[in-house]
Image (cartoon, rainbow, N blue to C red):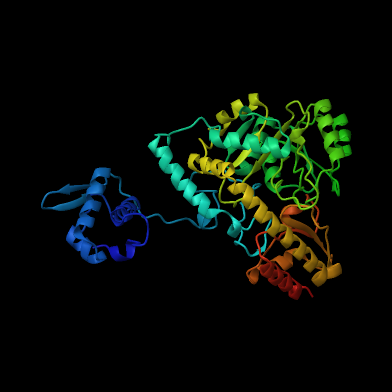
Amino acid sequence: MLPYQNLIHLDRKAATPIYLQLTNELVKLIQNGQLSPSAKLPSSRMFAQLFQLNRNTVTKSLEELEALGWVIIQPKKGAFVVDTFPIIRPNKWSKATDKNELATINDFNFYDFPNLKRPRAFQPNFGFDDGLPDVRLAPIDELARGYARNVRQLAFENDLSYQEGFGNLALRQQLVKMLNETRGLNIKVTNILITRGTIMAIHLAAAASIRKGDKIIIGETNYQTANMMVEHLGGELIRIPVDAQGIEVAKIREICEEQTVRAIYVTSHHHHPTTVTLSPERRLQLLEMAKQYNFVILEDDYDYDFHFGNSPVLPLASGDVKDRVLYFGSFSKIIAPAFRVGYLVGPARLIRELPRLRRTFDRQGDTGLEKTIADLLIDGTIRRHLKKSWRHYKERRDFFCDLLKQELGDLVAFQKPTGGMAVWVKFDERIKVAQLSKQLQQKGIFFSDGSNYNPPNQELNSVRMGFAAMNLEEIERCVLTLKELIP
């Protein structure tokens, strides 16, 4: 008899009923060949003894297996794995697969993606991340209660089926109201599509704008994920400098006079990674160029809500742009990265088309979650949360920047950002950021090696250091540990 106690794991604290856990575990044994066709399963009495279960629980599990077609129960003989499955040998992974190489699996050559980098997981609330919110501040209780309520309500209204792909109507309506009031966008519901975060919005916008060989202008330092998307779609990147006023718009005119440019990607409010804000003068020039040279602007406004100085500059999308700006943002920086809800704003004719493209990789979003966020916008929870987190993040920015100056002095160069959740820090050339990254991570503190921010063939020795996810005590501990590691 198989050592079922070693092969089957049952968690009595899990939400899944024990009989379903047992069913699922037995299905796995059949699928991987450890229970072969026609094999007899132990009796319900024996299973009950092995796992200290009620016999009725085991009987219910066996009946579920029979209903699903995995076993057949013969009266007075027991339960047998059906004999219609092919004999499956337990899989032995090749050395290539152990190394995460997709070159050869069962002699079939899959395509791999060497030019695309995997997303990095960040240790929550400890270390210098890329500029993430503190999820401990998020209105999780309100979100959880609202989600449970909305799922029940949607089920009661028989509205848990497929949707058209535009996103929950209530959320679209609330976002139109919010974006018009706070950012001067002057849009309607027909101008907005709900996405699973900003990355999906960027992908949809890029896919609708870019074909192989198209020229796309970006900052010399730029959001790496956007760069990868453009190149994956076959676009050719043209990099131009970024200074204290943002991307150097005058360079764009020079390029457009010589060749056809299809699009420009900008993080207008706080440039990624350097955090600088595109000046109002350059915004106006860029909008005029979009009309003159017939290109589209992909405007990523990922952290508009966190501006600590004067009033934030209105987005490019708020100008008279004649449908030349595609604008996107998300709730990832407001609530938490795990809640994948974002939005894409554009001309109605494009928004009507995008669900066709979306359907090729994502049928629709999470209707319950989208409706819940709409409710939190309506009842003011999001607004109150933004005010609270704004105070915390401003305090943390000031504390972090003062501490960097005090403890590291001339070893680092940076400008206090007017907003956002990170500081762009350049280290003295005697300090190697890549080595410092390894040392800090050995102490359990996340610190980028800087490679994600380097333009081709350049070593900036600079890092985007997120401060918002840590409280003051955690910031101090991380900075002092950083100081200890610098010779």
Q: Which quadrant of the view contains residue 257?
A: top right
**x, y (%) of residue 154?**
43, 38
**x, y (%) of residue 329?**
66, 42
Q: So how many labels did they put on this image?
A: 0
In this rendering, is residue 118 above or below 473? above
User: Where is the C terminus found, in terms of image quarters?
Assistant: bottom right
In this rendering, is residue 228 above or below 348? below
In this rendering, is residue 41 above or below 442? above
In the image shown, does 256 or 164 lie closer to the viewer?
164
Which residue is painted at 58% across and 45% down in the image? Answer: 112
Q: Which quadrant of the view contains residue 49?
A: bottom left
**x, y (%) of residue 139?**
56, 53
Direction front: furthest residue: 379
Q: In the shown orientation, is residue 486 left or right of residue 39? A: right
Can residue 167 be seen? no
**x, y (%) of residue 392?**
68, 59
Q: Which quadrant of the view contains residue 157?
A: top left
Can residue 31 be seen? yes
Direction left: furthest residue: 76
In the image shown, does 447 or 72 lie closer to the viewer?
447
In the image shown, does 259 or 360 lie closer to the viewer?
360
Which residue is painted at 84% across and 65% down in the image? Answer: 429
Q: In the shown orientation, is residue 43 left or right of residue 3? A: left
User: Where is the N terminus found, in terms of image quarters?
Assistant: bottom left
